[in-house]
Image (cartoon, helix red, strand yellow):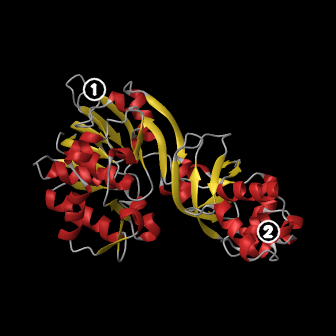
């Protein structure tokens, strides 16, 4: 039976980062994964260019049952530390809106960098390995039974991710293992995910597929994001929708401002004064795509000249433009979700080391725990930071 100091389950962002960190400390590290390829989620992220972190990472960019939990790990391994690593490997990158950093070339560069770091640190990565059983022995060691052999280790790190994107191999493995060892799991939901139409909405809005407009979207709890809104065949998507989905509960409406940064009432009054005989359709089409205007507003109203509209119609128009309330059917679920909300309760873990408080030697890192970041590189930063935190402790 082969023994290792550390076994990490999951060759994704957090697992590989943890492996390199532990390997550089002289630990004998083995990473196990059932996939054919390491870092599969990294490879498809950011349209294949990997939004690997963000210039401005703050604890309030994360959702967690305990808002203080993320502070220690994020402070010990900052986005600037990961940027320095990227630069050291000669990876060229660029900044987009809101401080998001992407590879100039390909997400493959990030996976190659992590695999190289593991190699330099002496950490071994073993793919295509199925784990059938894990037990903790009386000696304190963990014993793993795989389809290849049996292994033991002093420290066991779970970096198996959440349920999002099952086609990439997502599974409840990490949650089931946490339950086996008595840790509490918080309910899981699809996060950073598009919304879907009700049947009658689909008939009305499906023809708008492909239209994107600037927006400010507000959830029922008051959380607000100002980014692009995209109409799709299935529903609503785009950065603003993905962000707000983390703060949405089934049955709640969302409020969409289609003219962010504009005082709709003042703009309408100005058009009325300057172009009294212009149709409402043409007026609104200066601000929004014509097809969207025709889907949102009544045909008879759109055919009226501006000076034919009564005060209440003008008022209602401004309200609809600034706060279009819409009740969506639901989300596309884990199939297209970028993250999983919920997971291993962080109250069960040390915020400094990621070790389970009641099971010595057992660690959880990355998406498997109840920490989810906003869209924009924050989830990768949590993978790096939590991976390093555990890597320095195992």
Query: In the rendered image, which residue does mark 2 sit on?
Result: 294
Residue 335, image x and y in percent? 58, 54
10 Å crowding of disc 1: few (<14), some (14-19), many (20+) = some
Mark 1 vs 2: CB contact within 8 A? no
**In which quarter of the view is residue 136 placed?**
top left
Of the pair 318 and 146, the residue shown nearer to us: 318
Of the two numbered discs 1 and 2 on the same chain, state the one appearing first in sequence: 2
**In which quarter of the view is residue 97 placed?**
bottom left
Residue 144, image x and y in percent? 31, 38
| Residue drawn at point x = 60 percent, y = 40 percent | 249
Quadrant holding the C terminus: top left
Query: In the rendered image, which residue does mark 1 sit on?
Result: 357
Residue 339, image x and y in percent? 47, 50
10 Å crowding of disc 2: few (<14), some (14-19), many (20+) = some
- Horizontal arrangement in the rendering, residue 290 relative to residue 113 (left or right): right
Q: Is residue 116 visible?
A: no
Of the pair 320 and 26, the residue shown nearer to us: 320
- Horizontal arrangement in the rendering, residue 367 relative to residue 240 (left or right): left
Quadrant holding the N terminus: top left
How far apart marks 1 and 2 lie (CA) works out to 58 Å
| Residue drawn at point x = 15 percent, y = 47 percent | 28
| Residue drawn at point x = 39 percent, y = 24 percent | 182
């Amino acid at each position: 039976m082969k023994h290792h100091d550390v076994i990490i389950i999951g060759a994704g962002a957090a697992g590989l980062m943890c492996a390199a960190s532990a390997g550089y400390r002289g630990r004998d590290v083995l990473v196990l994964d059932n996939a054919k390829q390491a870092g599969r989620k990294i490879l498809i992220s950011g349209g294949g260019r990997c939004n690997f972190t963000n210039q401005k990472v703050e604890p309030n960019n994360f959702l967690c049952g305990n808002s203080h939990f993320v502070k220690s790990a994020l402070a010990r391994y900052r986005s600037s530390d990961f940027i320095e690593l990227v630069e050291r490997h000669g990876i060229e990158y660029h900044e987009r809106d809101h401080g998001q950093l992407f590879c100039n070339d390909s997400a493959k560069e990030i996976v190659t960098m992590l695999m190289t770091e593991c190699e330099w640190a002496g950490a071994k990565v073993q793919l295509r390995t199925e784990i059938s059983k894990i037990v903790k022995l009386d000696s304190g060691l963990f014993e793993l039974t795989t389809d290849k052999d049996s292994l033991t280790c002093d420290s066991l790190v779970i970096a198996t991710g959440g349920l999002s994107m099952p086609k990439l191999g997502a599974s409840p493995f990490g949650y089931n293992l946490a339950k086996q060892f008595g840790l509490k799991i918080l309910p899981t939901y699809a996060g950073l995910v598009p919304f879907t139409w009700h049947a009658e909405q689909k008939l009305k809005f499906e023809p708008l597929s492909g239209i994107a407009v600037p927006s400010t979207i507000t959830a029922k709890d008051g959380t607000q994001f100002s980014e692009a809104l995209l109409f799709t065949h299935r529903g609503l998507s785009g950065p603003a929708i993905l962000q707000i989905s983390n703060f949405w509960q089934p049955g709640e409406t969302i409020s969409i401002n289609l003219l962010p940064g504009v005082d709709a009432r003042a703009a309408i009054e100005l058009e009325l004064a300057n172009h009294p005989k212009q149709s409402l359709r043409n007026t609104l089409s200066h601000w929004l795509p014509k097809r969207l205007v025709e889907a949102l507003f009544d045909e008879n109203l759109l055919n009226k000249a501006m000076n034919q509209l009564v005060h209440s119609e003008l008022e209602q128009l401004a309200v609809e433009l600034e706060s279009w309330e819409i009740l969506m059917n639901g989300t596309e679920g884990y199939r297209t979700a970028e993250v999983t909300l919920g997971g291993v309760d962080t109250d069960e873990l040390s915020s400094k080391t990621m070790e389970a408080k009641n099971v010595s030697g057992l660690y959880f890192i990355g998406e498997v725990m109840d920490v989810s970041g906003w869209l924009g590189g924050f989830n990768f930063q949590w993978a790096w930071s939590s991976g390093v935190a555990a890597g320095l402790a195992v």
